[in-house]
Amino acid sequence: MIKDLVLYTYKASEDVAALKSLPLLGFKVESLKDSVDGIDPKSLFQLSHPGQPSIIFRAETIGSAERHVY
């Protein structure tokens, strides 16, 4: 979940407390050009920041992925 420019990671959707949090200030949202694990790159997007590993997300639909990037 993203709230106030912070990405919160939970173990399960019903959990109240997050396992991790990552401030997103300065991250770029980018589309992917190559598939990952055979997944169509049109449904993937990533958060990237210099000096940090990229975080890749898979959207439920290509349209949803496009809305995150543009």
Image (spheres, helix red, strand yellow):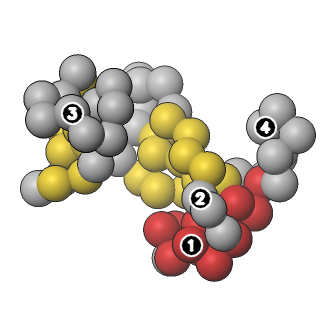
Kind of residue indicated by mark 1: Ser
Q: Are marks 1 and 3 in contact (CB under 8 Å)?
A: no
Mark drawn on residue 3: none
Is residue 63 visible from the viewing direction of this image?
yes
Q: Earlier in the sequence, mark 1 or mark 3?
A: 3
Kind of residue indicated by mark 4: Val
Identify the residue position indicated by label 2 in the image: 59
Q: Are marks 1 and 2 in contact (CB under 8 Å)?
A: yes
- Who's the residue at 55% across and 46% down the image? 57
Quadrant assignment, res 38 = top right
Q: Where residue 33 appears, x then y in whole percent?
A: 78, 53
Dot 4 falls on a residue whose secondary structure is loop
Separation of marks 1 and 3 at Cα, in angstroms: 25 Å
The answer to which of 47 and 44 lies nearer the viewer is: 44
Identify the residue position indicated by label 4 in the image: 36
Kind of residue indicated by mark 3: Asp
Mark drawn on residue 64: 1
* 40 horizontally vs 43: left or right: right
- Who's the residue at 51% across and 76% down the image? 67
Instruction: Give the number of the mark in front: 1 or 3.
Output: 3
Q: Where residue 41 appears, x then y in whole percent?
A: 78, 54
Quadrant assignment, res 15 = top left
Separation of marks 4 and 3 at Cα, in angstroms: 28 Å
Dot 2 falls on a residue whose secondary structure is loop
Separation of marks 1 and 4 at Cα, in angstroms: 18 Å
Separation of marks 3 and 2 at Cα, in angstroms: 22 Å
